[in-house]
Image (spheres, rainbow, N blue to C red):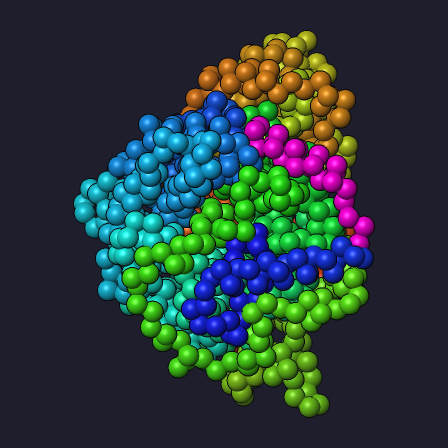
Amino acid sequence: MSKAGGGRGCGSSVPQRAPWSLVAATAAFCLVSATSVWTAGAAPMSREERQKLGNQVLEMFDHAYGNYMEHAYPADELMPLTCRGRVRGQEPSRGDVDDALGKFSLTLIDSLDTLVVLNKTKEFEDAVRKVLRDVNLDNDVVVSVFETNIRVLGGLLGGHSLAIMLKEKGEYMQWYNDELLQMAKQLGYKLLPAFNTTSGLPYPRINLKFGVRKPEARTGTETDTCTACAGTLILEFAALSRFTGATIFEEYARKALDFLWEKRQRSSNLVGVTINIHTGDWVRKDSGVGAGIDSYYEYLLKAYVLLGDDSFLERFNTHYDAIMRYISQPPLLLDVHIHKPMLNARTWMDALLAFFPGLQVLKGDIRPAIETHEMLYQVIKKHNFLPEAFTTDFRVHWAQHPLRPEFAESTYFLYKATGDPYYLEVGKTLIENLNKYARVPCGFAAMKDVRTGSHEDRMDSFFLAEMFKYLYLLFADKEDIIFDIEDYIFTTEAHLLPLWLSTTNQSISKKNTTSEYTELDDSNFDWSCPNTQILFPNDPLYAQSIREPLKNVVDKSCPRGIIRVREESFRSGAKPPLRARDFMATNPEHLEILKKMGAASSIDAEDGLRFMQEMIELSSQQQKEQQLPPRAVQIVSHPFFGRVVLTAGPAQFGLDLSKHKETRGFVASSKPYNGCSELTNPEAVMGKIALIQRGQCMFAEKARHIQNAGAIGGIVIDDNEGSSSDTAPLFQMAGDGKDTDDIKIPMLFLFSKEGSIILDAIREYEEVEVLLSDKAKDRDPEMENEDQPSSENDSLNQSAEQITSSSQEVDLVDQKSPEESSLNSQPESLSPADTDKAASVSPSEQISNPMENHEITSLDGECTDLDNQLQEQSETEEDSNPNVSWGKKVQPIDSILADWNEDIEAFEMMEKDEL
């Protein structure tokens, strides 16, 4: 059953090795039944509006794909702010994020089957010819095995699947002779050396030309990999084996899955995030359904669907039972410890778990899918996009959003399962937000910070591979698609594999080694096709009744109480456990409780671990709240019209943009450009926003000089060529040690790359107007109507050609101005195989992790009880001893809890999220 087919109940009553046509037909019948239940009681969206939204999705795809082909191809990805391609080694390194790039035209390959789904068959045929003509898979580049498998191998196989379908129809691809499949086979063999480990788990990276463990390979020394990295191979590798008859690929992928299954924590049936590929020891023992594990669970269920091996289903059901028992805390999904699953491992969630409601729909567990999806939608409505991570009280934890498709995926599944037009409205919101906040003249730009609306010069290939596919299918009728989507299953990258592979080249022996470890309540899995009268009671407003209590979960409530308090933590007549937010270091009773933690019983030990986790996070949060958040520089003049938003560092002096109205004006360069003496061109900057170069004097001195010349604001541009907010922490500009109350204008800091966008725009258009604010403002509709995409692309392309970049690493420590302090930037995108570990260095402090120190901002102004408690406690302690910080106040706890060092280190590792 494909995702589109909504095969919702792969339960234990499915006959072992049942003919797939029977299972698929049953699932299709269930989908029709479920949909009819919903449409009977809900006002559907008109076909005209659905067609209009579908056409809008097509236009958006054309905008993204067309700009990639025009400005970036044959590079791997498009940089939409500078209208050029991202080539590995020619841009500053982004860490693990760049491991997806292999100089193999990644975006083109990842988009192949999307072209067919969107009925762009001529463009598909042209794209296939380009892949065969231009793409080289023998590059001396170290790439992620995981990313290369799901994006490139999956993209080639998905393209091949639809190429042979089109050829059979007789109109297109008549010349095609399995060329994409041969490329896929070549790539498959290049990935096989990664599996040369004693465990069978693959190395996380491989050199496409030299493999692993050779001196020239520059890889093969890694010891750890994430669970998803090793467990998300079976669909692509098995499909390659079934297509070609070469069984080795499926055998290797099965061996890796078997090893992960054997290494699960037997008492909880959970798996950790990171595992040693040689010993099989769990390196990170926290477990969830988000980053690092997500697609492992997805591929267990889908491997059963595609391959018909019921052992995969039994494994999935075993894990799913554990997930619902320990991790699911509706509507939240919180990580736990695999060896102590009743203890939460963290108090925040990452955006990748947004896929899980869709997987629950495939499983047939609709109610929790609706609950979690609705919670995520409420967060999106607050911030326009889903932050990369957010806390259990719905504060932003990591503020970037790389245009991830997982929420759109789950929205599509829920609509297919329920037919509820509510999910069409959700999809409409996603389309509007993408066009309003992420669309730029040269494509769609990732959000650097959902709070400020600033952009990142990044458009990942998965945006074209998945987002447009799910959005188009959400609004499309069956006749809008030129083939039967029900005949295919979607991979985790939304590539299409035909279901008939389940009966092709079945040469792999299937030995069921699962049941001996599994003791489950069969009542959870007693249907193969869920009875709609069970899943969907006769009330047609069933889904609405589930969603309604969650409507205000983000807006008006403080849902810390949603986190369940473990029953084991309460004893008859006992007091509730001490929480970190209530702790006072001067309270003897609190200190006595701390002494008992970990000594009296296992319950006390769990209370102690939870307390230490909360204490670490509260201490970190207080440090974050002392930092100013990033600001936004929005270009509002033609042809940008507010679509380009640059991430800017704030100043500790001058007008506070978070408390005052934004400053809008045309920009002008100051003379001298460094702004370190009285300006010689005051008439040029009078009433404008002055551009100044960093260095040679204090920031406050620069501000005074441009203010005296009549400037209404200032932008300091870094003089370190090639520096960028994508790869370096933002600076928070400090004063000069003197009274800076005389500075009344706003001052912001841009790195060289962002500053070059403004400088090149000046050279191209002369008059450039910008908006300085704490958060990007909505675009002016009248200005939008004047926008001409083609002219924008042409002009920006000319500007982009003038922009230079440097592969030299950015010096994170400013040696020029000792008064400058560091402001942490957003971390790079988190995915099972890519987490940027760029650090933030303050001139006076040691290197720290930007994820660890990033500010947490409340999603609303009403959840203030915890903030008030912290503020009152802080004020009380400051009154008693103004020289002692909150963090220093709790130092005596360390001596009391010396035995917990190992657990503290584990928590710190989780907070850094070193995937």
Magenta-drawn stretch contains 320: no
Q: Residue furthest bottom?
A: 572
Residue 844 place in picture, x, y as percent: 48, 45
Q: Quadrant of residue 787?
A: top right
Question: Which residue is drawn at the image coordinates 34% and 49% (left, top)?
Answer: 243
Is residue 166 positioned above or below 419 on the image?
A: above
Is residue 816 positioned above or below 462 on the image?
A: above
Residue interval drawn in magenta: 42-63
Question: Which residue is drawn at the image coordinates 43% and 39% (left, top)?
Answer: 168
Question: Which residue is drawn at the image coordinates 68% and 67% (left, top)?
Answer: 532
Quarter occupied by the C terminus: bottom left
Residue 463 place in picture, x, y as percent: 53, 40
Q: Residue furthest left?
A: 215
Instruction: Looking at the picture, tell me which residue is in the foreground, 270 or 734.
Output: 270
Question: Which residue is drawn at the image coordinates 24% and 40% (left, top)?
Answer: 209
**Most common secondary structure along the magenta stretch:** helix
Instruction: Looking at the picture, tell me which residue is in the foreground, 854 or 482.
Output: 482
Q: Quadrant of residue 813?
A: top left
Residue 194 place in picture, x, y as percent: 27, 53
Res 476 visible: yes
Res 911 visible: no
